[in-house]
Image (cartoon, grey):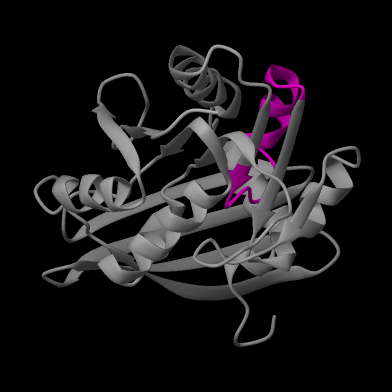
Amino acid sequence: MPEDIGIYDLGDLYDAIYSGRGKDYGGEAAVVARHVRTAKPDATTLLDVGSGTGGHLAYFAKEFAHAEGIDLAEGMLEVSRRNLPDISVRQGDMRSFRLERRFDAVVSLFSAVGNLKDTAELDETLDTFAKHLVPGGVVVVEPWWFPENFLPDYVGGSVQTVDGRTVARVSHTVRQDEGHSRMEVHYTVGDPADGIQHFSDVHVMALFTREEYEAAFTRAGCSVHYVAGEYEGNGLFVGVKNGSE
């Protein structure tokens, strides 16, 4: 594999890892949809930002009359377009994308916002989300870990065999500095046709505080509350855009 390849360039491999690990895209999408409808019962349109290979998006398309996705990585979008040919997905940066329509809900899951560098970028992102909401629309964000519950020096590992291909993944996550974690991940892929290949990549993720998330929602013109215990991982922020039609 090329030296500069990363997991987000390899959507099929990404799918093999997380489907093999049993990620519950359907259950997670159902929790998010329920919170959207609690805040806006008449919601019919949804935008999934950081939609990846379409794991959640496939279920949102069943829950809402219209759902579409945005992701920065073409390698992920290629798989989504192939698997979900009837659902619109396009390339875009969560900090600055501009679409010609607004939605009843904008969601960003799987801790995609952790890839932002600092609170200035978090502000840009929430402002962009709010600009694509109708008044009274709902924004749902799954955060990365908070500084107080981040577990440094964590080693994770898994091995899956999907469609004859075996993928081993080992990660080591440390605290890079006060506001960021650094996760180094190594992958070994065994394929009957291609033999054994290895690559690695690094993910630097922002450890925003709960207060920093809530302040970004507020500055974007949204009320917000934090939901814990209903969603695997670090919970959800659920915001509602202020104003009325």
Between 48 and 17, the one nearer to me in the picture? 48
59 relative to 216 in the view: left or right? right
Between 29 and 159, the one nearer to me in the picture? 29
Q: Please determine whether, in this image, residue 205 is positioned above or below residue 156.
A: below
Residue at screen point 64% across, 33% down? 46
Task: Specify the quadrant that holds the N terminus.
Answer: bottom right
The image position of residue 85, as x and y in percent, is 90, 42
Report if residue 53 is visible in the image. Answer: no
Report if residue 220 is visible in the image. Answer: yes
The image position of residue 105, as x and y in percent, is 56, 33
Residue at screen point 34% across, 61% down? 123
Q: Which residues are magenta?
A: 48-65
Q: Please determine whether, in this image, residue 53 is positioned above or below residue 140.
A: below
Q: Is residue 199 magenta?
A: no
The image position of residue 44, as x and y in percent, is 68, 22
Q: Is residue 53 magenta?
A: yes
State the image quarter where residue 210 is shown: top left
